[in-house]
Amino acid sequence: MMKSFVTPRRVKIAIKVFLVLGVIAFAVYFMRFSPGEVNLYPVTRGIVVNEVMGTGTLEARVRAAVSPKISGLLTEVKADQNDRVVKGQLLARLDDSNLRRQVELAEAELAVARAALPRLDAEIVAATASAVKARENFERVVALRKGNVIAQNELEQATESHDVAKATLSRIQAARLEAERNIDRAAAALRYAQAQWSDAELRAPFDALVVRRNRNPGDVVVPGGSILDVISLDQLWVSAWVDETAMARLAVGQPAEIVFRSQPEISLPGRVARLGAETDRETREFLVDVDLLQLPANWAVGQRAEVYIRTGRRENVPTIPSQLVLWRNGQSGVLVARDGQARWRPVKLGLTGRTHVEVTEDLKEGESVIGALPGRELPRDGRRVEAVKP
């Protein structure tokens, strides 16, 4: 008797193969022939706003570090983070005991220098009188000598007295000039000491907001070391990096919208304030500063934001949602329902916006474009589709 080739093991394998083939056939049928549910979006007339997008951070145009000109011990810090201060307001103070004594010493030296003037003025008056008397005596003796009334030695004595009187007056006048220079020098030393003393007080350079406190009383600070960082609120902007390909479309004064990542649901108005003149050689982006015309409720310098700069606007043009546009080999197109199947159709686009694009050719107003249901993908070209309400 011949042995049968049909064994239970082979039957099990055949059943498994049959099941797998059945699953594959069902999947193929489902993917190819069962209708996929989609949304249909009609082409409607509307507004398309073309925008250039950039990512950057909120910055203050004017920023300063409040730092000392001299080294010293910090004794007071009179402002803290988030405090608003006005120009000239006292913000911090260094230990000024030595500087105060230097001012007192300079004041004393100036007083001594000034005290010499009255004495020298009195001496000048006396020396002037003596010089006048000596000159008159000299002139009288000269006249008498011409008449041979007096001897030659009397003329010589009168000449000597006259010369001595003039020299004495000149010496005292020179001493007075030196005293005036001493006064000027002492006054300059006093001004320097006062300036050094005033440097112990650090004041606000402009109306500002304190954004950071870096030092506390008891710290030893040196010139250039920041105690407080302050910014002016007169102009806050977002310094955004924009791709260099958009450079030709941008201009100062263009309107913009600013969206902070902390509040993505809110768009704030802005305006292009400045265009950078240098492109980053690695990223091929350049800086665009966009004025923030309205601050959010909560903000911080350095926080991230996206800017959308309006470069074009068209009204009453055929539009479709931007996410419905598909690209194949560099050609823009959409999926449309034809004979119950999804078919790709190339279309020509005009102005492109954040949410909608302008359709210039190949689609007419009222025609519908296929869109995917939430959480699903668009059907493949040729698959049967069934529209549901969007």
Image (spheres, rainbow, N blue to C red):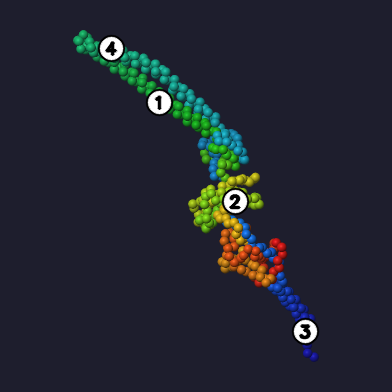
**Secondary structure found at label 1:** helix
- Picture disc at residue 257: 2
Amino acid carrying mark 1 in the image: Arg
- Residue lying at the far right in this picture: please name it: 1
**Secondary structure found at label 2:** strand
Q: Quadrant of the C terminus?
A: bottom right
- Give the alpha-carbon distance from disc 3 to disc 1, as whole Å: 130 Å
Pointer 1 residue? 181
- Give the alpha-carbon distance from disc 4 to disc 3, as whole Å: 165 Å
- Give the alpha-carbon distance from disc 2 to disc 4, as whole Å: 98 Å
176 and 233: which is toward the camera: 233
Residue at image location 52% in from the left, 39% down from the top: 223
Relative to residue 138, is residue 239 depicted above or below?
below
What is the total number of numbered labels drawn onto the structure image?
A: 4
Earlier in the chain: of badge 4 and badge 3, it is 3
**Of marks 2 and 4, the one in the foreground:** 2
- Give the alpha-carbon distance from disc 2 to disc 3, as whole Å: 76 Å
- Picture disc at residue 307: none
Labels 4 & 3 near each other (Cβ < 8 A): no
Q: Quadrant of the N terminus?
A: bottom right
Q: Position of residue 45 (x, y in %)?
A: 62, 59
Earlier in the chain: of badge 2 and badge 3, it is 3
Disc 1 crowd, CA 10 A, few/some/many (<14, 14-19, 20+): few
140 and 167: which is toward the camera: 140
Amino acid carrying mark 3 in the image: Val
